Image: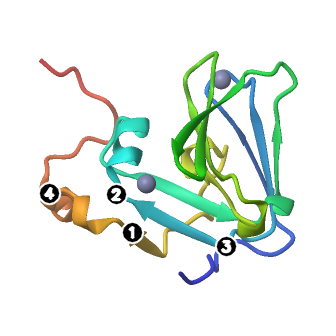
């Protein structure tokens, strides 16, 4: 994947889970911003895909002063984290530190405008309608649905 070009090396992006118990700070440009269509991301996000922001662990601090963060072993060598207070999914972690990579989700950031996806993975599980989103009726804000 190509590095995100919209974020400069000196940029600092902050964010949090929905309740604010877990805070994230990303320093510098991420390694990549990637749409993940895998079925695990569909389940954990509750959506059709996740927007993954990958970086080196040294660039990303996870601040959890009230120990709200929980980990779930999602694969033989991977864990997913979430806030135990509000349920927000926070990250994807490799058990092997030599992977030198941590992933958090784009939606955590207060201003994610510089985090622009440059690729997508697990397209085998991508629903066909994703490519036709512009054809669906749109509303600038929420509407009362039946
Ligand atoms: Zn929370
Ligand atoms: Zn995924």
> Does mark 3 have its CB less than 8 Å from ligand 2?
no
Q: Quadrant of the C terminus?
A: top left
Residue that badge 4 annotates:
129
* Element on which disc 2 rests: loop
Mark-to-mark CA distance, 2 and 1: 6 Å
* Element on which disc 4 rests: helix
- Other-residue count near label 3 (Cα within 10 Å), few / some / many at <14 / 14–19 / ≥20: some
- Other-residue count near label 2 (Cα within 10 Å), few / some / many at <14 / 14–19 / ≥20: many
- Residue 33 location (% of width, % of height): 55, 67
Locate residue 59: give its quadrant.
bottom right
In the picture, the disc for residue 131 is: none
Residue 54 vertical position relative to residue 23 in the rendered view, above or below = below
Rendered residue at 49%/68% (across/down): 117
Rendered residue at 63%/63% (across/down): 54
Left or right of 43 on screen, residue 17: right
Mark-to-mark CA distance, 4 and 1: 16 Å
Q: Quick one: label 4 or label 3, which is nearer the N terminus?
A: 3
Mark 4 and mark 1 in contact? Answer it, CB < 8 Å.
no
Q: Nearer the viewer, mark 4 or mark 3?
A: 3
Locate residue 4: give its quadrant.
bottom right
Residue that badge 1 annotates:
121
Q: Residue furthest bottom?
A: 2
Rendered residue at 48%/75% (across/down): 118
> Does mark 1 have its CB less than 8 Å from ligand 2?
yes
- Residue 124 location (% of width, % of height): 23, 66
Residue that badge 3 annotates:
31
Residue that badge 2 annotates:
37
Residue 91 vertical position relative to residue 81 in the rendered view, above or below = below
* Element on which disc 3 rests: loop
Mark-to-mark CA distance, 2 and 4: 13 Å
């Amino acid at each position: 994947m190509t590095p995100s070009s919209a974020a400069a090396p000196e940029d600092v992006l902050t964010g949090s889970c929905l309740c604010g118990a877990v805070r994230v700070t990303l320093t510098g440009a991420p390694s990549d911003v990637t749409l993940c269509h895998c079925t695990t991301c569909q389940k954990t996000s509750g959506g059709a895909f996740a927007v993954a922001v990958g970086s080196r662990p040294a660039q990303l601090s996870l601040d959890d002063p009230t120990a709200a963060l929980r980990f779930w072993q999602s694969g033989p060598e991977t864990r997913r984290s979430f806030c135990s207070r509000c349920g927000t999914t926070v990250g994807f972690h490799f058990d092997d530190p030599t992977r030198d990579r941590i992933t958090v989700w784009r939606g955590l950031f207060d201003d994610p405008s510089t985090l622009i996806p440059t690729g997508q993975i697990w397209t085998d599980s991508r629903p066909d309608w994703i490519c036709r989103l512009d054809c669906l009726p749109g509303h600038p804000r929420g509407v009362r649905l039946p």
